[in-house]
Amino acid sequence: MEKPNKFLFANQLRGIAVFSVLLSHWFGMYWARSDLVAQYTASPQEGGLAPAVYFLVSNYSHFNFGAFGVAIFFLISGFVIPFSLEKLQPLGFLVARFFRIFPTYIFGLALSLFFVYLSGQFWGIAFPWGNGTMAANALLVFNLLGVNTIDLVNWTLAIEIKFYLLLALMIPLIRQGKVWMFFVWAALIFLVNWKVQGIAVRLAIKPLNTALYAVCIEMMYVTYMMIGVLFYYQIKNKISQSQLFIYSGILLAIVALTWKVSTVGQQFPVTTANYLWGYIAFTTAYLLRDKFIPIKTLDWLANVSYPMYAMHSLIGYTFIKLLSYYGVGFELASFITFGLVGLIAQLIHVYIEKPSTDYGKRLAGKWG
């Protein structure tokens, strides 16, 4: 009998997470923030009535499919990334992650912006972004420079990069299965967020002010990602299952408290609750990991989840709006758009993501 794949649960959760984010954006945000969608896609604002599916996706006071999906993505990263640290030194690890993230993202961003350009040409609306803004987004430093995101999803990738940098510094401690540094970090980020508003007000230089706000909030999410590392510890028998629940519960509570006192405290507890649901979903899947079996559709969605996540928003919004203009119903337009985005994601996965990831691994091996 074939041995169960103990990591299949994490891979399939990727598929669930990306589909959850897609639901939130296409069926929720497309209607709830039609003004923002119009601005980012160089198109007129959607003026029709929201379909029934909008209310099915969005009519929950303490649950948001998008935030739930992002929470799962963060925990998956926290769980799987430490496996890369077992053999690689910091430089090799960072090289591998660079080639895992940037080639796919930059290609997906360029393609998304090309769709926005075509949208602007079709609707007679000027392309909304300058070269500096596009460069800052491509390099995932836009938030540190006070520049707007141009695809509405890359803020999570900016957090991922900082998580990688922090883990590279923690490699010796993670290999030893140390836990204390997570709590020291969490307490530090809580204190910084608690005091950041007063500090930021005294900063006269606006770029520093903006960067301080951005980094403080991002580090709160990094604390949440450390919960995923605890699951790695447990599966490697560095901590017991009871310790996993105690330690992760403490970190989750600190994240919630940090959120409450931060500059985005108005999101507490509504948005924060989704990260609790993400934790519950991930924990349940982890405990039942031996029960997971291959499911072709879900496994495919998991495999293309990164390129799909990276470019689904702008291309999806643009294409749905174009189809609607030609009289295609919203539900059918969304279904057709999913096919288009899925095809593009598959091509990026095969011709960009896999080759660049493999190259990064080979280079990382040479560089330690």
Image (cartoon, rainbow, N blue to C red):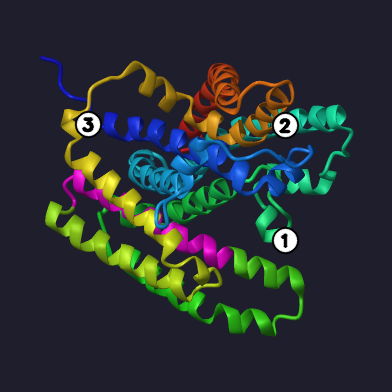
Mark 2 residue type: Ala
Quick one: SS at disc 1? Answer: loop
User: Where is residue 69, by image quadrant?
Assistant: top left
Q: Is residue 340 visible?
A: yes
Whichever of callouts 3 and 1 sits on the residue coming sooner in the sequence is: 3
Q: Amino acid at mark 3?
A: Lys
Label 2 element class: helix
In x, y percent, where is residue 108?
65, 30
Within-10-Å neighbours for mark 2: few <14, some 14–19, many 20+: some
Residue type at the position of mark 1: Gly
- Residue 155 at what x, y percent from top left? 59, 50
x and y percent of residue 358 in the render? 50, 24
- Disc 3/disc 1 C-alpha distance (Å): 42 Å
On residue 110, which mark appears?
2
Q: Residues within 10 Å of mark 1 (few under 14, many from 20)?
A: some
In magenta, the rendered stretch is 215-238
Above or below, 55 against 247 in this view is above
Magenta span contains residue 21: no
Q: Which is more N-terminal, label 3 or label 2?
A: 3
Which numbered disc covers residue 6? 3
Residue in the foreground of this view, choosing between 254 and 139: 254
Image quadrant holding the N terminus, namely: top left
Depth order, front residue of 77/71: 71
The percent position of residue 121, horizontal first and vertical second, equals 87, 29
Mark 3 and mark 1 in contact? Answer it, CB < 8 Å: no
Residue carrying label 1: 146
Q: Secondary structure at mark 3?
A: loop
Evaluate if marks 2 and 3 touch, with contact meaning CB atoms under 8 Å apart. no
Image quarter for residue 190?
bottom left
